[in-house]
Amino acid sequence: MEKITLFGKTPEELKQVVGELGMKPFAAKQIAEWLYKNHARSFDEMTNISLKDRQRLNESCSIGLETFSNVQSSADGTKKYLFPTAKSRFIEAAYIPDDDRATLCVSSQVGCKMGCLFCMTGKQGFQSQLSAGEIVNQISSLPEREKLTNIVYMGMGEPFDNLENVMKSLELLTSEWGYAMSPRRITVSTIGMIPAMKHFLEKSECHLAVSMHTPFHEERKKLMPIENVYPIAEVIETLRAFDMGRQRRVSFEYIMFKGLNDSPKHVNEIARLLNGMRCRINLIRFHPIPDTPLESSDETVIQQFREALVKKGIRTTIRASRGQDIFAACGLLSTKALVKMQSPDF
Amino acid sequence: MDTGLSGFVKKLPLKPLTLLDINQISTDAYILSLPQTHDFLPGQVVAITLDASIAPRLYSLCSAPKDETMQILFSVKPDGLLTPMLAKCSKGDQLLVSAPFGAFLGDEQPAWFIASGTGVAPYRSMLRAGLTHNKKLIHGGRFAHNFYFQDEFATALKDNYIRCCSQESGDGMYHGRLTTWLQQQQQLPAHQMYYLCGSAEMVVEVRDILIGKGIAIERIMSEIYF
């Protein structure tokens, strides 16, 4: 019989499991504390649970935490961890230390369906969704877990294409019974799946990052097929209609492509679209992927683009490229070489 | 007329529509017929679900605006949530359906339509709407029964209808994957549009082949099953 995986379950779900095992309901709270507060990796560590109940748990359940199976270290201190998931698949997570901050970029899917032209993950297609436990495992099983200050959902996959598990993972991270992290330390990135984004805005207090990459509809359609159904103008209209409060942050990610989206015309259209909106833009250098026709904009162009946006009153930053030498930089995460999938027929 | 660019949020609410008909057209594929409640453009999609507890999925309309009903082509994904339930629906059942939207739209320009499996749906809508001139359809499927609407396409496009069948051989079919067929083409027309519709794997692979053969990204339009 397949064992029940406990890591990733809420106290309510744990209550149901312990009930089925004939244990007292309060054991659910104890297990949650061991899993999420004390980071227990075996039932034997759960010393305030009776020996008999621990035996029951050992017989019927597994913790479900997975240790990383590989790590690569960059010259700049960035580390890329490879984690196993269900069905012998793999995901990557990037640990990015920076002075007094330490950010973990987590994956939400194995592969991705979105097919963005500039993204390495998209090249491997979609293999499977990650469970909430598999998402949070990237944090819990990270050797540098205690140093983490920020979590960004910007690894492999589109978080809002796995809405249920991503929302549950956010609950695990931000609940008092869970990791009790401030939602202000968590940013979820999306290419703009509007219905799921609305759900996230209503049900979570975490920050949001939207991949814009160009303000022009026809141009964005060529870069990001999602634009066919969820145009960036509609995404921004949705955000404008939502009261973000004073603390919550919306940012727009903008990869700079030479000769494609780095002109004054783009600055003007971005300013028109975002007029009066409290947000910021992160300019990102493009990290080339195999067989791409795209190139990164020159440094001077990126600087000028930033200055032009700032002059328009838009808070604009340039993201530092980190972990490029180990393919951990933005848009480079991929486990394509490890995907033991059947070659898809079409 | 909705151009697909405005009002998605307003259109998002799903409304109950009565299923007029459901036809199994292949071992794994079905066509749903629904009342045509809105104008739409060939290539647009609707969001569909059975009840509010199940997240709606997007499906391309495979009928033309001039048709009496809105039709959706879908194949059953054994590990999917919605399609096995849709396949069990009967005439008279209620579905929750959005208004049509989307911007994967055809026009009069010369174009190659490239699809895998049910990704052929938007092209059927475009072809039924009269967009047949200077069009070539390259359809990939595993088996002969995966070439949905093949009689219609053969009549409308004649030699410009290419079926690439990876698991079976048969009269008039190319035996192999559509990516292999594309790789074997010596030169691709540079000054026309290329429309891609299907799984992420197919779209990404075909797009790389086209770019590798010198097609500009401005000439490639993709629609992926999300």
Image (cartoon, rainbow, N blue to C red):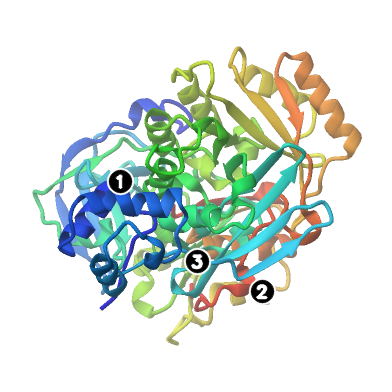
Residue B29 visible? The answer is yes
Subunit under mark 1:
B
Q: Position of residue B204 (x, y in %)?
A: 59, 61
Q: CA distance from mark 2 to mark 1?
A: 38 Å
Which residue is at the front of the view, A200 or B72?
A200
Q: Amino acid at mark 2?
A: Gln
Q: Disc 3 on helix, strand or loop?
A: loop
**Which label was assigned to residue A66?**
3
Q: Which residue is denoted by mark 2 in the rendering?
A: B183
Q: Which residue is painted at 23% across and 63% down in the image?
A: B84
Q: Disc 1 on helix, strand or loop?
A: loop
Q: Is residue A55 left or right of residue B185?
A: left
Q: Which residue is denoted by mark 1 in the rendering?
A: B55
Look at the picture and state if A141 lies above or below A304: below
Q: Which residue is painted at 35% across and 38% down in the image?
A: B100
Q: CA distance from mark 3 to mark 2?
A: 41 Å
Q: Amino acid at mark 3?
A: Glu
Q: Do dots 1 and 3 share one subunit? A: no
Look at the picture and state if A34 lies above or below B4: below
Q: Position of residue A266 (x, y in %)?
A: 73, 27
Local crowd size for mark 3, using a 10 Å CA cut-off: few (<14), some (14–19), many (≥20):
some
Look at the picture and state if A259 lies above or below B212: above
Subunit under mark 3:
A
Q: Amino acid at mark 1?
A: Ala
Q: Position of residue B18 (x, y in %)?
A: 14, 43
Q: Which residue is painted at 31% across and 66% down in the image?
A: B79
